[in-house]
Image (spheres, rainbow, N blue to C red):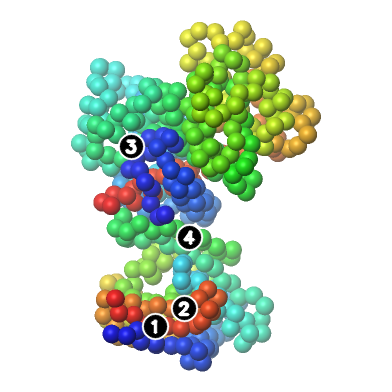
């Protein structure tokens, strides 16, 4: 397999196992590239990419931008605040105006689930979903899979628990699809109010007890509590959440095996994990950030390669 | 037309040995020189030359790297290519680098190889060594300094190089499509 089966990266749901493996193996090559003295390759020098961020982002936006620059692509950035979106322009009009300036690829983050899929049907450009509402965040799942594979050698047969706010998390959904396609077992753990009812239909078990979940797993992916998405209270207080679902060093050290700790960022230190856990040797949080650039380079390289095919 | 065998057995070994002696004439003990094989097929020639040089010179380690050029190719949107491994565990800064590939055809691979190599530093000078030079088919002005053999061929023909390590025998064949 030398090419992807899709023309856009809209979600992990739409990828085959071969696609994911191709992206991960290509990312391995790019990881070597970004550790060279000169970290830039000319592959995308004829491509212009627009980063459309209708929602706030720090690391995803930076990571995409760095990946694009490392591939020698021309980059334009757009954020909804201060743009004509505020004047009432529709998504399609905004994007078509940008495409009229001869843009080849669009990286989009949007607050509405399905925005990327919708756009891919309406405009003639390659679309990469950088997060759409509580739906998918495919590049995060790919970089998480890459980081697990790098740390543990393979993903097949590994046990991974996703802890925290599953209900509002696009990272959780993309991770579940991705890890299952690669042959891992996935459990979710969190307060009942933050676990969506449909989750078991995806073949995912729910474990309400954090200690039991951690004893079971090889890798724990600790999600952030997304207070900005919670219009009602899903748990009484943050303190109570931390008592029940926060991971501290004492608990980590008391487990019967050394598990790997991941976090998609940004971390609420002292809420879902304490600082000493985030900075411990078992944590691969900063590796995830480094791998993010390599994985995003791989995705854009492979999608650009499909031009004219 | 039937495939034509260009090199095999003793003739193949003699060619490799001759290339090695030509290299020694210029690079002496290889202290400030390095071999870089271009992926995917040039690495076999690079490793063979390294092994032979180490035997002839009776020295332990000649720097030998593997360089993937996929990200530097000018045809990557025309055909789908899979990147392979790059492994250069030495500095090329101020070294004499010998780029190695099995067949020199249009010269585009070498062009990309030169670009890719420069991401690792600024070598003192760069030379090109190939096993087979298909002359009169160049698209860019690139010539090899060391050549195993020079052949005349047409675009529709293919040169297939086989290696003991991967194919069970050392052999160069001219194929007609």
Q: Nearer the viewer, mark 4 or mark 1?
A: 1
Marks 3 and 1 share the same chain: no
What residue appears at the point 62 percent right and 81 percent down from the top-left corner? Answer: B54
Which residue bears the numbered disc 4?
B84
- First-in-chain label (2 vs 1): 2
Q: Mark 2 near mark 1, Cβ–Cβ under 8 Å?
A: yes
- First-in-chain label (4 vs 1): 4
What residue appears at the point 57 percent right and 23 percent down from the top-left corner? Answer: A224
Most foreground residue, A299 or A285: A299
**How far apart are labels 4 and 1 at the CA level?**
25 Å
Check the image and report above or below for B37 versus A276: below
Q: Secondary structure at mark 4?
A: loop
Residue A127 got which mark?
Answer: 3
**How far apart are labels 3 and 2 at the CA level?**
42 Å
Q: Position of residue B134 (x, y in %)?
A: 33, 81
- Residue A125, quarter of the rendered image: top left
Which residue bears the numbered disc 2?
B162
Most foreground residue, A173 or A295: A173
Q: Mark 3 near mark 1, Cβ–Cβ under 8 Å?
A: no
Q: Position of residue B58 (x, y in %)?
A: 66, 85
Q: Position of residue A178 (x, y in %)?
A: 50, 37
Q: Mark 3 near mark 2, Cβ–Cβ under 8 Å?
A: no
Which residue bears the numbered disc 1?
B173
What residue appears at the point 32 percent right and 21 percent down from the top-left corner? Answer: A82
What residue appears at the point 64 percent right and 23 percent down from the top-left corner? Answer: A207
Q: Give the crowd class for mark 2: few <14, some 14-19, many >=20 residues within 10 Å.
A: some
Q: Secondary structure at mark 2?
A: strand
- Count of numbered circles in the view: 4
Q: Position of residue A267 (x, y in %)?
A: 59, 26
Most foreground residue, A70 or B11: B11
């Amino acid at each position: 397999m030398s090419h992807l089966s899709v023309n856009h990266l809209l979600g992990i749901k739409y990828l085959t196992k071969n696609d994911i493996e191709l992206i991960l193996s290509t990312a391995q090559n790019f990881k070597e590239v970004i550790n060279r003295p000169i970290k830039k390759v000319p592959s995308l020098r004829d491509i212009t990419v627009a980063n459309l961020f209708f929602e706030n982002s720090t690391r995803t936006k930076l990571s995409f931008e760095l990946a694009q620059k490392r591939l020698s692509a021309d980059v334009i950035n757009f954020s909804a605040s201060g743009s004509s979106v505020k004047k009432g322009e529709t998504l399609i009009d905004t994007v078509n105006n940008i495409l009229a300036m001869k843009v080849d690829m669009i990286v989009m983050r949007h607050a509405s689930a399905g925005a990327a899929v919708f756009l891919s049907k309406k405009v003639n450009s390659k679309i990469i979903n950088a997060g759409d509402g509580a739906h998918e965040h495919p590049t995060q799942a790919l970089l998480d899979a890459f980081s697990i594979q790098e740390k543990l050698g393979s993903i097949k047969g590994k046990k991974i628990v996703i802890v925290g706010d599953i209900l509002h998390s696009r990272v959780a959904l993309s991770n579940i699809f991705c890890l299952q396609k690669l042959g891992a077992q996935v459990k979710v753990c969190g307060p009942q109010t933050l676990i969506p009812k449909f989750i078991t239909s995806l073949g995912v078990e729910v474990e309400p007890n954090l200690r039991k979940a951690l004893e079971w797993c090889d890798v724990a992916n600790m999600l952030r509590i997304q207070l900005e998405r919670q219009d009602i209270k899903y748990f009484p207080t943050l303190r109570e959440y931390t008592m029940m679902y926060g991971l501290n060093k004492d608990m980590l050290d008391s487990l019967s095996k050394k598990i790997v700790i991941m976090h998609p960022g940004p971390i609420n230190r002292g809420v879902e994990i304490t600082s000493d856990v985030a900075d411990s040797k078992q944590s691969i949080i900063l590796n995830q950030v480094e791998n993010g650039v390599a994985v995003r380079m791989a995705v854009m390289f492979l999608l650009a390669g499909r031009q004219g095919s | 037309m039937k495939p034509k065998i260009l090199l095999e057995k003793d003739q193949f070994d003699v060619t490799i040995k001759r290339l090695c002696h030509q290299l020694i004439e210029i690079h002496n003990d290889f202290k400030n020189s390095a071999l870089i094989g271009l992926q995917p097929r040039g690495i076999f020639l690079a490793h063979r030359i390294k092994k032979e040089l180490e035997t002839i010179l009776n020295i332990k380690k000649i720097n030998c790297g593997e360089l993937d050029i996929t990200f530097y190719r000018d045809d990557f949107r025309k055909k789908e290519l899979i990147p392979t491994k790059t492994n250069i565990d030495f500095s090329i800064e101020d070294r004499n680098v010998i780029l190695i590939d099995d067949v020199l055809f249009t010269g585009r691979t070498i062009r990309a190889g030169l670009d890719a190599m420069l991401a690792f530093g600024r070598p003192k000078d760069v030379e090109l060594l190939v096993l087979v030079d298909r002359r009169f088919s160049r698209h860019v002005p690139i010539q090899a300094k060391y050549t195993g053999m020079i052949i005349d061929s047409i675009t529709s023909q293919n040169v297939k190089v086989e290696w003991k390590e991967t194919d069970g025998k050392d052999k160069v064949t001219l194929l007609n499509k």
